[in-house]
Amino acid sequence: MTDTDPIANKGSLLIVEDDRIFRGQLMRAMIRRGFDVIEAASIADAKATIDEQSPDYAVVDMRLGDGNGLDLVPWLHERLPQMRIIILTGYGNIASAVAAVKSGAVDYLAKPAEPDEIAATLLSSGQEAPPPPENPMSVDRVRWEHIQRVYELCDRNVSETARRLNMHRRTLQRILAKRSPR
C-alpha cells in the first residue's frame, strides 16, 4: 500500500475550522486519503474533543471565532506531545509562520492548501521537507479561490467584495461569471 492508498488507515485527524463549508470539504478529502476525521468548529469544541479522544494529527485554522488557533497548539501539545499539528490560514505572513512553528506546529500552510500537501506534511518524518505537490494550483486558480473566499465572506455582496479587494465592481463581476481556472 502507498501513502495515497485510501484503504490504509493513517490515523485520526482533528480538523479545527470555523468555516463550515471548507471544513466539510477538507474532511471529505482527508477521509479519502485514509484518515479518521474528527471535526471541531472552535477552540472550545477542540478542547472538548481532546478530553474524549486522542487524535494523532491536527489541522488548525489560525483565525477562529473564539480565538487564535496558535493559542491552541501549545495546549494540544501539552496533552498529546506526539501530535503533529499544521496551522492553516488565509492570512499568511512570515511572522505568523514563525510563531506557528515556535508554538509547536510542524508546518504553516496558506489556504487554499491542497489535501495532498496537507497529508504529505502530516505524514512526513519531520526531518525532511515533504515533497512538492505533483499538481500544484496555478497562480490564476489561487487568485480565483481567494476572490471566491472573500466573496463568500462578504455574503455574496459584489460591491463589498470589490471594495475589500480594491477592485472595480464590473471587473469582479466578469471574474465571478467565468469558470474557475485549472
Image (cartoon, grey):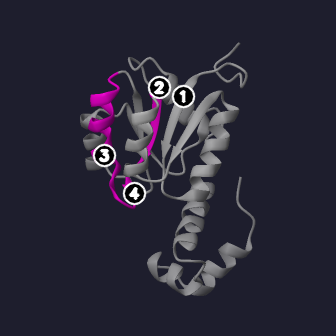
Vertical arrangement, residue 96 with respect to residue 58, above or below? below
Counting residues from the N terminus, which is met first, the one under dot 1 or under dot 4?
1
Say which amino acid is labelled 2.
Answer: Asp
Q: CA distance from mark 4 to mark 2?
A: 21 Å
In three-dimensional space, the C-alpha distance between marks 3 and 4, rounded to whole angstroms, equals 10 Å
Residue 141 placement (x, y as % from top left): 63, 56
Cα gap from disc 1 to disc 2, whole angstroms: 5 Å
Q: Earlier in the sequence, mark 1 or mark 2?
A: 1
Question: Mark number for residue 64?
Answer: 4
User: Bounds of the magenta span?
Assistant: 54-81
Rounded to the nearest angstrom, the CA distance separating label 3 from label 2 is 18 Å
Q: Element under label 2? A: loop
Residue that badge 1 annotates: 12
Name which residue type carries label 4: Leu
- Identify the residue at image location x=35%, y=48%: 69
Secondary structure state at the residue bearing disc 3: helix
Of helix, strand and loop, which one carries label 1? strand
- Mark 4 or mark 2: whose residue is earlier in sequence: 2
**Cβ atoms under marks 1 and 4 closer than 8 Å:** no
Label 1–label 2 contact, CB within 8 A: yes
**Would you name the residue on which mark 2 appears?**
56
Earlier along the polypeptide chain: callout 1 or callout 3?
A: 1
Question: What label does residue 136 carry, if any?
Answer: none
Counting from the top left corner in percent of width and height, residue 128 is at 42, 19
Looking at the rendered image, the quarter that the N terminus falls into is top right
Structural distance between the alpha carbons of marks 1 and 4: 21 Å
Give the mark nearer the N terminus: 3 vs 4. Answer: 4
Inter-mark Cα distance, 1 to 3: 21 Å
Q: Residue at x 47, y 75 (%)?
A: 165
Residue closer to the observer: 32 or 177: 32
Q: Which residue is mark 3?
A: 70
Q: Is residue 131 magenta?
A: no
